[in-house]
Amino acid sequence: MKVKLFLPPVLDVWGLMWAPQYDIWVLFNTLKDRFRDDEVSMSDYRFYFYDDFYKELKKNVLFQVEDYYKHQDIVNIVNWVNVDNFFWDKAYGLYSSVKDVFSDVDYLIIPFSVFEQSSMEYFLAWLLFSYYVKQDFNDVKIIVFWDYFSNYAKFVIEEFDFIDSVVLKGDKLAVCNLISNFESGKSTEINNVIYSFWNDVILWQESEVSIVNDVVPDYSQFELDVYRKDWKLVLTYEMWEWCRNNCFYCYNVHKWGNFSTKDVKKIVSEIRLLKEVYNTDLFDINDSEINYSREFLVDLAGELVKSDLWVFWSALVVPKELDRGLLELLYKAWCRQLRFWVESGSQKILDVIWKWTNVEEMEQVLSDSRDIWISVYASFIVDLPQETNEDIKLTMELIYRNKSLFDNIIICAYNTHIWNFDLRYFRYLLWKSDYDFCRTKRLSKKKILLRRFCDKLWICNVDVIDFLRGNYGIN
């Protein structure tokens, strides 16, 4: 039996993809713990063709967009696959040049999660590679390691018959159990799995995911040289998998679960190990919010200071319950950026999305952070169903009042992602050349409005990985 974890090449690079991802190495090491070392391998081709392919893509394809704000517009992708078969010829050429890696594989695992930014470009890449693999190696079982909304995973396995299985919620133990099921030929019930077994599509019950905390951090299977820029490598790290919040619009599928964290001494020892093995002092903390507990955060910061590690890091937080004393302690613990879920300047919207904070508290937290030289990265969301023009106006006023505090702002749009259209239409996009449906998709006008507003205030949008690599604010 041979199991391969495969990271397909990307067409375009999104910020977080420039750091090797925590959930992927945890999956890889979980597989190695369950099966023999010689049965499990990993191939990281994420950036293998990126420079040549993307340059040629831009040279050969005319992007019919009005301005760069529409970079994510679905029309771009339609144009990519609709110009003189360039995309198809190139994509198959990429696959053909590496297809030997699949010749001795029984189970091919391909990740698709929020860490891949869930972009249509990445979706298209792994879907095409899966299709080509199945054509040449029909016996290979293709398993998608899915950490995104479950209803779309069901569409994938229903509409694309070359996908054998989808494991939901990034459930690493379910992947292992699924492979054991296939090996034994039994249909033992496995929660968090959708798969085609004996020619039937079976969806078993979704359940909470068991957190895997006992594997040793190991990024050695990634092509780390391509993740480095200016000789700097940013590593990702997580302290838990669940989020205590349940914001209805959020992409995080791990909500309201059995919330637990690693011991702070274990966290510090693992970060020390990563620093020493991979010679880096830059870390992106991926947890949905590190300030879920003041007691935990104080203990963590204190342990980092005591350890004298000197590692610089960025983390996600909710802008509440962060007093100036705690922020100063985080700075002493080498936190150099906090990414705040601000979301809106309207109290009505904050209440609707259960943010459990208020505008005045948020502004105070942002001000205190900037005063002590912690970079302020803020995210906002638009196009919620309850949103009015007055709510947008209040958000713009909050941004204007605090323009000197923001180092970065990102604008997100609710329900305007690739998944806003039914994935069944994606089949036609790929194999029936029905582009008319997709051409109706446009990026949010409110998102464009707010982005232009921020640009006029000279508030940029530097990705967290570039921030850490560039030493912005690190002193």
Image (cartoon, helix red, strand yellow):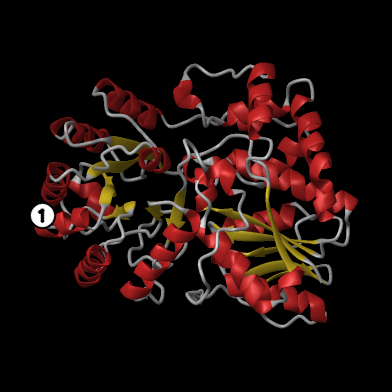
Residue 226 found in image quarter: top right
Residue 24 locus on image (x, y percent): 57, 60
- How many marks on residues? 1
- Which residue: 71% across, 76% down? 35
Q: Alpha-carbon neighbours of circle 1 within 10 Å: few (<14), some, or many (≥20)?
A: some
In the rendered image, which quarter contains the C terminus? Answer: top left
Residue 283 locus on image (x, y percent): 39, 53
Left or right: 299, with 49 as reference point: left
Residue 156 found in image quarter: bottom right
Residue 84 found in image quarter: top right
Give above or below for 97 relative to 193.
Answer: above
- Which residue: 76% across, 50% down? 130
Left or right: 344, with 420 as reference point: left
The residue that label 1 is drawn on is 324
Q: Nearer the viewer, residue 45 or 176?
A: 45
Give above or below for 218 relative to 226.
Answer: below
Left or right: 369, with 355 as reference point: left
Amino acid beneath label 1: Arg
Residue 158 locus on image (x, y percent): 72, 57
Left or right: 387, with 115 as reference point: left
Whether residue 150 can be seen here: no
